[in-house]
Image (spheres, grey):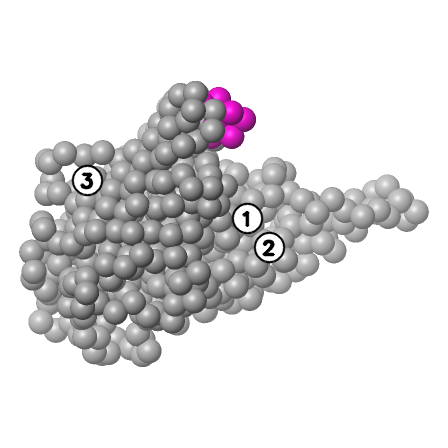
Amino acid sequence: MNKPLNSDPLSRRSFLRAGAAGASAFTIIRPELVRGAGAERLRAGLVGCGGRGTQAVVNLLSGDPNVELVAVSDVFEDRMNTCLAQLGDPKYLQSNTQRVAKFTGKPVEELMDSVRRRVRVDPDHRFVGFDGYKRLVASEVDVVLLCAPPGYRPMHFEACVEAKKHVFAEKPFGTDPVNTRRFMAAAKKSEELKLTVVSGAQRRFQKEYIETIAKIKDGAIGDVVAAYANWIGSPVLQFNSPTWPGPKGQRDPKWSDMVWQNRNWYSFVWICGDQVVEQHLHNIDVINWIMGTHPVRAVASGGAAWRPREEAYGNIYDHLVTDFVYPNGVHMTSHCRQYPSGSYQDVSELVVGTKGRSNCRDLGTPGLDPYVQEHIDMCKSIRGDGPYINQAMAVAESTMTCIMAREAGYSGREITWDMIMASQQDLLPKNFDYDASIPVPPLPVPGQYKFV
């Protein structure tokens, strides 16, 4: 039986356990158990029905057999319809469940059928519009998958926490200092409420990384004296997607600025954060994880050498190199770069210690696909069957670290942690309307760009 909307997990679990032991056996329940919904089926809702959101649903449903998708929300109805169609498409499901089937030994057809049967989104739970997330959060869902473009993450997360929902939040957790701090405020409240919050920084669930970083922290390579993080690869071009609804690689003349920038979200700073924030966070987060904190200052250099100065390519850089300094004086060199497809690629981390070096995964053993493992661990945390997980603040700090690098590169200034935490930069549009006009700022030029 599904639990009623907004039921109190404390009253349900603690009183059932106490009743079984007798009226005189009331004890303080362990904190990690004051969060579960027992063995009941969890009901999930998806906010953001693009490629990452659709894959996240498959990862969740293939990782835990006792979860169902009951609600979806997106700004665009066609994107929502494509998502639901893919979740019923054998070819799509097969390509996204093969690795799990191989690792677990389950027949892929059985896994595909299980996933497909647990997509139960009736017409009344398909919410379209900029406020669709509010209606989804207010519905009878236990956990919300936040997979819309990053600019929306703080407001979506805040709504989930206010409604006491557990959350899977794709990274990053914001695109500017004001709204990332908004996320941080909600993160503190989520901890107080004992909500489970799992991030899309999936390396935190990858067995090789977990085991290696534990050994590094235990001194396997001595004291860390330097670190390197790289994301050098092909650009993300929304307008080249097979599901692009407009003219191939172009803006549909009928689209307003708001529609265009939401469709082609990876090209605009306000909604994607630039590559260093949206992609490179993965690597920078690993180094923060190892160091146990965030850097205190950053100096960076970058620009746009490959991306043409055309409307479709927006106002983000295609390369940025940053020198971060941690509180103990250790430097991290960070390099993110976009090259045309077929060029050199390097997505990696490296830490150098007084007794050796590590690529942050070479001291561990392989495990399940971390994109699936993160959802398995999330469900165990929600039910109280595994360790409590709340990564909201840790990954929010990594998000702010990346924003600090971007602002250092854009402005040509050294940016400190105190400066970025006090910054009044708020990039979000003030009017979320399909017809809204959103002028695109020019590509940032150091010396002209003003850090605020």
- Going from N to C along the chain, the mark reached first, 3 or 2, is 2
Residue at the location (49% across, 60% down)? 184
Crowding near pointer 1: few (<14 within 10 Å), some, many (20+)? many
Vertical side of 362 occupied by 166: above or below: below
Q: Give the vertical position of 105 relative to 393 (above or below).
A: above
- The secondary element bearing badge 1 is classed as loop
Towards the viewer: 386 or 64: 386
The location of residue 332, given as percent across then percent down, is 34, 40
On whether residue 130 falls in the magenta region, the answer is no
Residue occupying image coordinates x 61% and y 39%: 387
Q: Which mark is residue 329?
A: none
Image coords of residue 425 (percent x, y):
34, 69
The residue type indicated by label 3 comes to Gly
- Indicate which disc, 1 or 3, sits on the residue closer to the N terminus: 3
Question: Would you say 19 lies left or right of 58 here?
Answer: right
Cβ–Cβ below 8 Å for labels 1 and 3?
A: no
CA–CA distance between discs 2 and 1?
7 Å
- Circle 2 residues within 10 Å: few <14, some 14–19, many ≥20: some
Residue at mark 3: 233
**Can you give x and y, in whole percent of width and height, for residue 235 in the image?**
17, 47
Residue at mark 1 to residue at mark 3: CA–CA distance: 30 Å
**Residue holding disc 2:** 191
Question: Alpha-carbon neighbours of circle 3 within 10 Å: few (<14), some, or many (≥20)?
Answer: some
| Callout 3 touching callout 2 (CB < 8 Å) | no
- Label at residue 390: 1
> What segment carries the magenta color?
213-221
Q: Picture quarter containing residue 261?
A: bottom left
- Asked if the residues shown at circle 2 and circle 1 are in contact, with their CB atoms under 8 angstroms apart, the answer is yes
